[in-house]
Structures are given as structure tokens and as C-alpha cells.
Image (tube, rainbow, N blue to C red):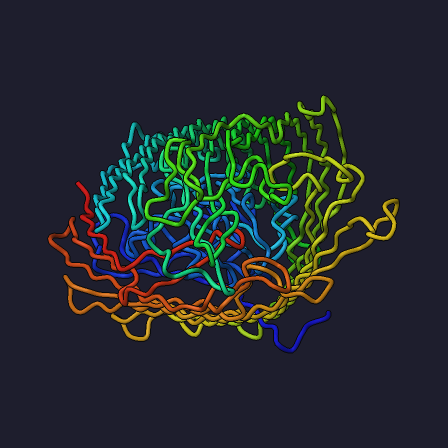
């Protein structure tokens, strides 16, 4: 294996659960997250303890999410090693997994959840973040890592009603309900519901989110369990693409200015998601699982944003578009997990398959201004969908009408068709993996996955249909050495691929239908050490290489290979220092460049975080933490502006009012630091939130 001396990676984050879910022991921390997924078979498909998984991963449970006052995937990422947030253009979760940006490597109970939106956490049992290529278990994509949400399921033999009511100092508030009813000896119904009114520190921001998720469980027999779920999703929010940069950094003086149209920067999402899972135990050594997933999504995303900035004239160029997506995802998957021996060697074999059909229609319309600055100037460089405005708070642009930088009244209409595509995608996959216990000290993991990716795209604008079929095999190998039961040292190799139609199947125009998929390889070594039942240390070193094809600039008939390389290391210490004092601390170092030797965007060299909680007595406790992110480039290029490094301090406290109720305070950015956590492009840098607090009443009946 090839590694750089400056590279190490974290293996595993066993996040502690913060308060007991049944609210009868809310003052006491408990250690959870020893397996991936609640039923021990979802993400990694087999009931393998985390210490025996030859891969870097992290888990955050629902109890810790609640105790931290976390309401978004991005807040989880802030305290996870090896990953950082991307802007996502203000309308979607976007994560940089070990230097690889993704808006589609999200999963729900192991099912691909690739539509672009902000995912709620009200119905989630735990969040799992696996780093490194993950094609064997999840298929194409997952090139730097994946994020899997494990949903809450109905529970037989239990009856409870849990609630969480919270409000923050921006004026936002959140209501959550989680109730479970035992409907018989072998069945149960659970309902999770939420309403969230959004607000923040930026002008014009607004939003509402609704979620309703009933689930049912039927224990058909001692060997068969059926879980059914339906989720209704309704989201609307304001879109804010941030502020311009000048002199190589975001313009701090613009921290309060929104560069958009207050009435036409928005996202709406309506979705219906159905899930069914059947789990059957054939024998003590053979278990099967069948899963059906169907999602119907309708999304609109409209926005204006700063595309250019003239610091001398204090003028900004606005650009924009409105984007529509209608998508249907049907996923059928199944797997068998069997355990057997050959002589003295023990095997845990996973054999599975997956069928996916996706139909996705998407279109984008650019604005056209009826008059533009410099429209009669032969040297005018503005496009028809751009216009210049003086920088003021607020900008003189609202409801598609405004006064441009030379005092003319201008009006825009979303009438210029940028693209319109209809996609039909069929994916067929099967995989096999064998976890081989060679001895008491050595485990070997070997596996491979075959994917057939068949896409057809009708380009409405060009009246052209294109298709491409890719068939790829993705191998995985890992070796785990356990000198003793509480220590594992591992080495692993894995591959993944991404078709040239990209994460969102937008098109295969130009040469994309002639190019092979991008391929990714990952090499990793690490150690996982559980000092005792309450404290663990993990560390790993990795290298991730990407290979893709592009046009040769000197010969349009020829393709050339383009590589990029990302390496790094991650370490973490987590657990109880005393019975009342818990700490999680992690650090990651990342280094990456493309084939030209240019450093990659959104890749801070150093990130670190620490979170510690202390239980003062039976009714009161507090926590404090900090997250640090090194400076990073906004774009991959020699002259890229830089996002400055920052440290943000957060804190929490709780008071137990009764054995079923607690009052909780969470404070973010305690020192009121001005920072810019991410950026989409040169003139779209996100402004981090100033000091704010969330007060929550959490309890049960």
C-alpha cells in the first residue's frame, strides 16, 4: 500500500448516548452505538461489533442528538472527524467526505436517499457515517463516504409518549412527538411527528417543515418480523447563498446583507416515502432480510445570488435560476446472512442483491432582464441572465424588479430554458462478502459487488435521447488483527465508482456518454482500542485516489487520464473519565491535490473538536465544547479565495424537573465569533450564525 507520512485517519467514533430515551433515567449517560444500526444488520448488513469492522465510521444516537440540541445533519458533521460541511447552495444537505463533496450519498435504513433536501432528524434512531469508498454495500457513489439514517421503528410490548418542545433566540421553534402503542401481543404502532418554524440571523429568512411518520410492526411468528412505514414530508425555506469575497476572503462588512430576491429565493419540497421490511430467521445460522422502498418527490428551488463583485464601485452582479425536480425512486433489496464453519475457520457470509428504478424529470430556467447595465456597450461581459446592483441593505431588487447600478428600473422573468431532461435509470446489483475468522486473533474480510447501471436521458431542448450502460465490479478486502479482545488493528482496501451522469443524473451530454465512470480506491490502516467499558481510542491513516477521463486539450479525439489524491489521518478519544465526566475529542488532518498539483477546494488541512459533559448531581449537569476548522480554498484553482480558519464554542446545561421531565439549554457560538464555514463558489460564502440559544422542554407521559 502507498501512504504519505503526513496521513492518518480515524477509525471509529462510538458516540455516547446522552440521556436515556425512556425519560425515566434522563439524568444518566449511557454508552450506546456498539453496532451499526439498531437491528445490527442495516448498514454493514451483518451483526459485526464496530471494533471488528475494518473501516472508519461514526455513530451519533438519538439521545445524543437531543442532548446536544442538534436539529440538522450539518451540526452532526461539525463534531465528526474526517468530514466537513459544504454549502449545498442553501437548499440541500451537502457533506465533504474526506475531501469528496457529495449531495447524494445519503441513505435511510440502507436505502439510497439521493434527492437534494435538508433531512429532518425527528424520526431517527441514530446517524451512521462511514468513511472511504463504500460501493460493496451501497453501490455507485459513496466515493469518500456515506451517511445513513436509521429510522425509529414500532416496538412491541411498549407504550410511551415522548415530546420535545424547543425555541431559540432567533424566533424559530420546534415541536416533536414520539408515541408508541402496543396493539397486541405481536404488533405495535408508532407515530413520530414534527413541526418546525425556521428563522435565523439573516434578513428575510423564513421556513416551515412538517414531518409525519407512522410505523407498524407485526411479529408474524417467532421467526418473522414485518415493519411498515409511511412518511409525509413538506418543507419550505428561504435560500441564502451567502456573501461575496474580495482580496481573497469573504467581505466581513457584508455579514448582514442578503444578496438575493426576498420573494424569489426559496425551496419547496413535498414527498411521500413508503418502506416495508421483512426479516426472517431461517435457523440459528441463517437470517434473511427483504426491503422495499418507494419515494415520490416534488421539489422547486429558485434563487438569485452574487455571481461577481466590483469592490471599487461597490457593485454586485446578480445571477439566478429556478430549478424543478420530480423524482420517483423504487428500490427492492434483499440479503442473506449465514454463519458456518469449514474445519476450524468460521465464516459470516453476506449475499445480497438490489434492483433500483429511478424516474427523474428536471428542468432549469435562467432569468432574463428586460434591461441591463452596459447592454449597448460592445465590451459588455454580462450575460442576459445577469444584472448589476449597488451593494445596499437591502439590495434594490425584490419580486423580480429593482433599480440597477445606473438607476434604471429592471425586471426579470424566468423564461430562458437552461436545460430540461427526462431520465429513466435501471440499476441491478448483487454482492457477496465473507467475514472469515481465521483464528482467535485474525479476521479476514473479502467481498465484491457487481453493478449494472443503465441510464437513458431524453434532452427536451435538443430533442435528443442518449443512453449509456456501465457494468462495474467493486472489490473490498480487510484484515483485522486482535492481540486481545479489546484491541483491533486493521488494514483495508476498497473501491467505488461514479458514472459520468453524476450524482443527480442530470445529463450525459457532450462526451459524457463516451466516458467510463470515475473510479476511487481507498487504502486504510487503523487501530481501535476499548480501554474499558467506558473509554475508547481510535486512529487510522488512509489514502483515497480518484481516476477519471477527460478530453485532451491538444486532441479532441483523444481522452486523457486525470487523477486526484487525498490522504490524511483521524484520531479520537471518547468515553468516561469518571462516573460523571464524559468527553469526546477528535482531530483530523487532510491533504489533497489534483493532477496539476493544485490543492482541492473545501479541504481544511486541520479540523478538531471536543465535547465534554459533567453531571453535577442527580438533577443538574452541563456540557461545553468547541470545533475548529482550518482555512480552506473556496474553489480548486491557483487564485482561489480562502475561507479563514475559525473556532466556535458551544455549551449546554440541563435541569431535571421530575423523573419524566427536563429543561435543557443549548448555546451555539458562545463567544459570538464571525466565521464562514463553507462556500459554494467565489462570491457565495456562508455567514455562520452569531451567538444563539435554544431552550427545550423534554419529557414523557
Q: Residue at position x 35%, y 49% from top?
A: 392
Q: Quadrant of residue 478?
A: bottom right
- In the foreground, 192 or 469: 469
- In the foreground, 673 or 664: 673
- In the foreground, 91 or 536: 91
Q: Is residue 471 visible?
A: yes
Single out the residue that lies furthest toward the left: 657
- In the foreground, 517 or 179: 517
Q: Residue at position x 23%, y 41% from top?
A: 162
Q: Quadrant of the C terminus?
A: top left
Q: Residue at position x 63%, y 52% from top?
A: 143
Q: Is residue 554 above or below residue 386?
A: below
Q: Is residue 344 visible?
A: no
Q: Quadrant of residue 219?
A: top left
Residue 66 pos. (x, y %) = 29, 51
Q: Quadrant of residue 286?
A: top right
Residue 136 pos. (x, y %) = 65, 48
Amino acid at each position: 500500500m502507498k501512504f504519505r507520512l503526513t496521513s492518518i485517519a480515524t477509525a471509529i467514533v462510538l458516540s455516547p448516548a446522552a440521556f436515556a430515551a425512556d425519560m425515566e433515567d434522563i439524568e444518566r449517560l449511557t454508552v450506546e452505538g456498539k453496532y451499526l444500526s439498531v437491528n445490527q444488520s442495516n448498514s454493514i448488513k451483518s451483526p459485526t461489533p464496530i471494533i471488528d469492522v475494518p473501516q472508519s465510521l461514526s455513530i451519533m444516537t438519538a439521545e445524543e442528538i437531543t442532548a446536544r440540541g442538534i436539529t440538522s445533519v450539518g451540526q452532526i458533521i461539525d463534531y465528526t472527524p474526517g468530514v466537513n460541511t459544504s454549502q449545498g447552495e442553501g437548499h440541500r444537505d451537502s457533506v465533504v467526505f474526506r475531501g469528496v463533496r457529495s449531495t447524494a450519498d445519503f441513505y435511510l435504513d440502507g436505502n439510497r436517499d439521493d434527492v437534494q433536501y435538508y433531512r429532518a432528524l425527528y424520526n431517527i434512531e441514530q446517524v451512521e457515517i462511514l468513511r472511504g469508498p463504500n460501493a460493496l454495500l451501497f453501490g455507485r457513489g459513496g466515493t469518500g463516504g456515506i451517511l445513513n439514517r436509521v429510522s425509529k421503528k414500532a416496538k412491541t410490548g411498549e407504550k410511551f409518549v415522548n415530546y420535545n418542545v424547543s425555541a431559540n433566540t432567533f424566533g424559530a421553534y420546534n415541536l416533536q412527538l414520539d408515541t408508541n402503542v402496543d396493539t397486541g401481543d405481536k404488533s405495535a404502532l408508532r407515530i413520530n411527528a414534527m413541526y418546525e418554524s425556521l428563522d435565523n440571523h439573516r434578513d428575510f429568512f423564513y421556513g416551515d417543515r412538517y414531518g409525519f411518520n407512522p410505523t407498524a410492526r407485526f411479529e408474524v411468528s417467532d421467526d418473522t418480523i414485518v415493519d411498515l412505514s409511511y412518511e409525509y414530508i413538506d418543507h419550505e425555506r428561504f435560500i441564502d447563498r451567502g456573501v461575496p469575497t474580495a482580496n481573497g476572503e469573504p467581505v466581513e462588512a457584508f455579514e448582514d446583507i442578503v444578496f438575493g430576491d426576498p420573494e424569489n429565493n426559496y425551496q419547496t419540497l413535498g414527498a411521500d416515502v413508503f418502506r416495508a421490511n421483512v426479516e426472517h430467521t431461517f435457523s440459528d445460522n441463517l437470517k434473511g432480510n427483504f426491503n422495499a422502498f418507494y419515494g415520490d418527490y416534488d421539489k422547486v428551488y429558485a434563487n438569485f445570488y452574487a455571481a461577481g463583485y466590483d469592490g471599487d464601485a461597490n457593485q454586485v452582479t446578480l445571477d439566478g435560476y429556478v430549478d424543478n425536480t420530480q423524482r420517483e425512486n423504487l428500490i427492492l433489496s434483499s440479503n442473506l446472512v449465514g454463519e458456518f464453519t469449514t474445519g476450524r475457520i468460521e465464516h459470516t457470509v453476506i449475499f445480497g442483491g438490489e434492483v433500483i428504478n429511478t424516474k427523474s424529470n428536471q428542468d432549469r430556467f435562467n432569468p432574463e432582464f428586460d434591461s441591463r447595465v452596459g447592454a449597448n456597450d460592445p465590451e459588455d461581459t454580462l450575460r442576459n441572465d445577469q444584472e448589476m446592483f449597488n451593494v445596499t441593505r437591502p439590495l434594490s431588487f425584490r419580486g423580480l424588479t429593482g433599480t440597477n447600478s445606473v438607476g434604471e428600473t429592471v425586471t426579470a422573468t424566468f423564461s430562458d430554458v437552461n436545460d430540461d431532461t427526462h431520465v429513466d435509470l435501471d440499476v441491478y446489483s448483487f454482492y457477496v462478502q465473507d467475514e472469515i475468522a481465521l483464528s482467535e486473533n485474525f479476521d479476514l474480510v473479502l467481498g465484491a459487488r457487481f453493478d449494472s447501471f443503465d441510464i437513458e436521458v431524453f434532452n427536451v431542448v435538443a430533442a435528443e435521447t442518449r443512453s449509456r450502460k456501465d457494468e462495474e465490479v467493486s472489490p473490498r478486502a480487510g484484515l483485522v488483527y486482535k492481540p486481545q479482545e479489546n484491541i483491533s488493528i486493521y488494514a483495508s482496501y476498497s473501491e467505488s465508482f461514479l458514472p459520468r451522469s453524476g450524482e443527480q443524473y442530470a445529463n450525459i451530454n457532450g462526451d459524457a456518454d463516451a466516458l467510463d465512470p470515475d473510479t476511487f480506491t481507498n487504502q486504510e490502516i487503523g487501530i481501535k482500542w476499548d480501554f474499558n467499558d467506558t473509554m475508547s481510542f481510535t486512529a487510522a491513516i488512509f489514502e483515497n485516489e480518484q481516476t477519471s477521463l477527460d478530453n485532451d486539450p491538444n486532441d479532441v479525439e483523444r481522452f486523457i487520464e486525470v487523477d486526484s489524491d487525498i490522504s490524511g489521518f483521524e484520531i479520537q478519544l471518547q468515553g468516561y473519565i469518571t462516573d460523571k465526566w464524559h468527553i469526546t475529542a477528535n482531530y483530523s488532518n487532510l491533504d489533497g491535490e489534483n493532477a496539476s498539483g493544485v490543492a482541492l477546494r473545501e479541504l481544511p488541512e486541520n479540523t478538531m473538536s471536543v465535547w465534554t459533559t459533567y453531571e453535577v448531581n442527580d438533577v443538574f449537569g452541563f456540557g461545553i465544547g468547541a470545533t475548529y476548522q482550518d482555512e480552506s480554498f473556496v474553489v480548486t484553482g491557483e487564485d482561489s479565495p480562502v475561507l479563514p480558519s475559525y473556532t466556535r464554542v458551544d455549551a449546554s446545561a440541563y435541569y431535571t424537573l421530575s423523573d419524566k421531565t427536563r429543561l435543557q439549554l443549548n448555546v451555539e457560538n458562545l463567544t459570538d465569533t464571525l466565521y464562514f464555514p463553507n462556500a459554494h463558489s467565489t462570491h457565495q460564502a456562508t455567514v455562520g450564525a452569531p451567538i444563539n440559544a435554544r431552550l427545550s422542554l423534554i419529557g414523557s407521559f
